[in-house]
Amino acid sequence: MGTMTIAKGINNGLRAAMERDPKVVLMGEDIGKLGGVFRVTDGLQKDFGEERVIDTPLAEAGIVGTAIGMALRGYRPVVEIQFDGFIYPAFDHIVSQVAKMRARSLGKVKLPMVIRIPVGGGIGAVEHHSESNEAYFAHTAGLKVVCCSNAEDAYWMIQQAIESDDPVLFYEPKRRYWDKGEVDEASAPRPLLAAQVCRAGTDATLLAYGPMVKTCLQAAEAAAAEGKELEVIDLRTLSPLDLDTIAASVEKTGRAVVVHEASTFLGMGAEIAAELQQRCFYHLEAPVLRVGGYNLPYPPSKLEEEFLPDLDRVLDAVDRSLAF
Amino acid sequence: MSDNAVASSGAATTSPAEDEVLAELTAPVPEVGDGGPEMVQLLTPEGQRVENTEYDEYVKDLTDEDLRGFYRDLVLIRRVDAEATALQRQGELGIWASLLGQEAAQVGSGRAMRPQDYAFPTYREHGVAWCRGVNPLNLLGLFRGVNHGGWDPNEKNFHLYTIVIGAQTLHATGYAMGIQRDGAVGTGDPDRDSAVIAYFGDGASAQGDVNEAFVYAAVNNAPVVFFCQNNQWAISEPNERQTRIPLYQRARGFGFPGVRVDGNDVLAVYAVATQALNAARSGQGPTFVEAYTYRMGAHTTSDDPTKYRVSAEVEVWKHRDPIERLKAYLVHEKMADHDFFEALDREADELAVAVREGCLSMPDPTPDSMFDHIYVEPHPVVEAERREFAAYHAGFEGEGSH
Ligand SMILES: Cc1ncc(C[n+]2csc(CCOP(=O)(O)OP(=O)(O)O)c2C)c(N)n1
């Protein structure tokens, strides 16, 4: 048991996975001596050597493409993409190759690789450093997509993702990297592909993942002061979605608000809203609402507070839901 | 054009012995700080003019006034850069990518361009922007977070900064293919013939996009100069994590010439860039120029170079400072006097003040401006969200908190 940041949770999780399995290798730009631009791999090259913590050339298609080859050879590559906006040069490899290899080989090969992507905005960065692109990958069959939101999950989920024999896109909420939380390294972790109710409530359900979980917990806190009990669910897994947990909560509360940073058009919220109206039509007291980024390119950082969902916008949506 | 750099790395006339081949393959890349014998240099680090039969002709017509102009460019852009770094430290810019140490590579190449040429920069080309006449304040907007660039690239033929590494090399190549199709190559009219110059770093040379740009430029004989500022580092990764042969030699494999030039020697860069741009404009196709230089500061203000490089290396490069080098030459040749340097210092101070004031008075964008300029034609989703946004904010009016 210890308190650590999300970044440290991932670092410790990577270390544990590397100690356990010599086939686990890390690849990425600046992940060696520098420890990555967010220092998530700090100290790992020093302890595991350059053969296992590989500073790659500055080429994302190369990072993912060669990781595919290493996985085919029996390694378990964990690649770091420096920022969300730099995944696109590797997009083709991920959606055309990584996602389809298993099916193409009729199950003869597996690609146990993890692609780590710091995600989202709110850090005052320049363009291409604040994007939420999880829906592209959740949309692609053959991939698993997960997102951690706290230190405990950071520590466990990265290890579970590495242990998975399927390729996993592992999103890390970059503006929460330095948030601290308790990590129990001895207890058994919850399953990788399960949502978690992180605050119980009866009036409405807030559904979020990654950076927005904290925002939703704060919103629930504020709502409680006004006598409204909101249930908050951390989705944790985006593909596959844990619809049983989600539907159970919404059947209880009758109302759902999905919150994410990505633009709402064809985003995770759209899928969840569609599923909920199919599964829980008779339990719903209000339409499922979405709060997300606007359907715009991520704006310059002086405007990101206007662009990103905040406490007020979440509470406003809750009010609209309750007003039905 | 004749290209000694390519010739020197070309195939031997008699077949080499196996151990010679192996020795070549395993030969270490040049030490940092050693550009190797092929590197074009016209001014030594001490400011001594050295002869170069191939490149002297490109600088022979430069007047004292031109050389003082180069010096002025170097000093002023370094001052803009220093002021921007200070502004970042004071919280006025979110981040800044300093050009410290790379001034000569940028000014030498920037001054070799003609008005109708077009530059495609990465995010550190403040010196090139300066030479193109772009107001330095324009460059600050991206780093202050008020816009994503915002200037009109066609006003000065200086494209927007590109953050995604290497992407602009393809844009530059395509633009050059357009120039070809417009018949603005090889006409002999100095005001019509045009070329494109694409800037990128040594790290970028690893990107697929950059290698694809080389292929496209080569097979199309496009009028583009690939100008790589090899500042030795891609954030924390040294050259040998990106390449095992000197970068300029790569060009040969793509079918066009590559030249390595001392990137801290503004005269040599001017000469090499002029030659390459001339070749492009006259229809001889692409050239790869590797400006061998050094990033004196951090990658950006968010970076901590002490984690990955030794300060002794920085000390070595301090002796190759591009500004001191030209100053020594100007003084030695009596092309500039005390009054000139004094007046320039004053001009630099004034420019710094203007940059500071301009930055501090830069207005924040209005919130609803984020809905502007997304599409050329009206878009119902954007317009609906713009209205929702306005209505939502109107709801807070009078509450005082917003
Ligand atoms: C596609 C992409 N991947 C990663 C990054 C993050 N990044 C920004 S600058 C940089 C290093 C660039 O090095 P180099 O090309 O040598 O240019 P320099 O900054 O040294 O001028 C990296 C990895 C990026 N901007 N784009």
Image (cartoon, grey):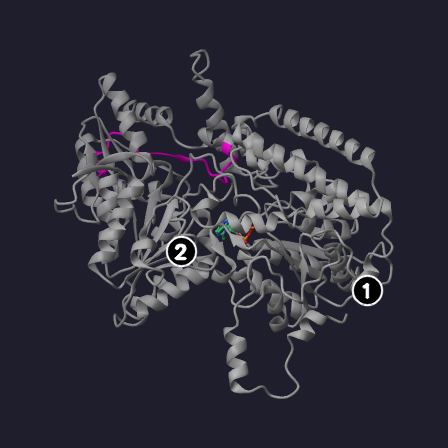
- Does residue A11 appear to the left or right of B19 in the view shown? left
| Label 1 lies in ligand 1 vicinity (Cβ under 8 Å) | no
According to the picture, the residue beneath numbered tag 1 turns out to be B186
Q: Amino acid at mark 1?
A: Gly
In this orientation, which residue lies closer to the viewer: B123 or B345?
B345
- Does residue A185 appear to the left or right of A170 in the view shown? left
Location of the N terminus of chain B (image quadrant): bottom right
Residue A270 in the image: above or below residue A202: below
Query: Which secondary structure lies at badge 1?
Result: loop
In the rendered structure, the residue with mark 1 lies on which chain?
Answer: B
In this orientation, which residue lies closer to the viewer: B168 or A247?
B168
In the rendered structure, the residue with mark 2 lies on which chain?
Answer: A
Label disc, if present, on residue A195 of the rendered structure: none
Rendering coords of residue A24 (x, y %): 27, 60
Query: Which secondary structure lies at badge 2?
Result: strand
> Residue, x 58% and y 53% (percent of image)?
B231
Quarter of the figure with residue B93: top right
| Label 2 lies in ligand 1 vicinity (Cβ under 8 Å) | no
Seen as rendered, the residue at the extreme left is A187
In this orientation, which residue lies closer to the viewer: B364 or A311?
B364
Rendering coords of residue B43 (x, y %): 74, 55
Q: Please give the range of residues in magenta.
A: A278-301
Label disc, if present, on residue A28 of the rendered structure: 2
> Residue, x 20% and y 34% (percent of image)?
A198
Q: Amino acid at mark 2?
A: Gly
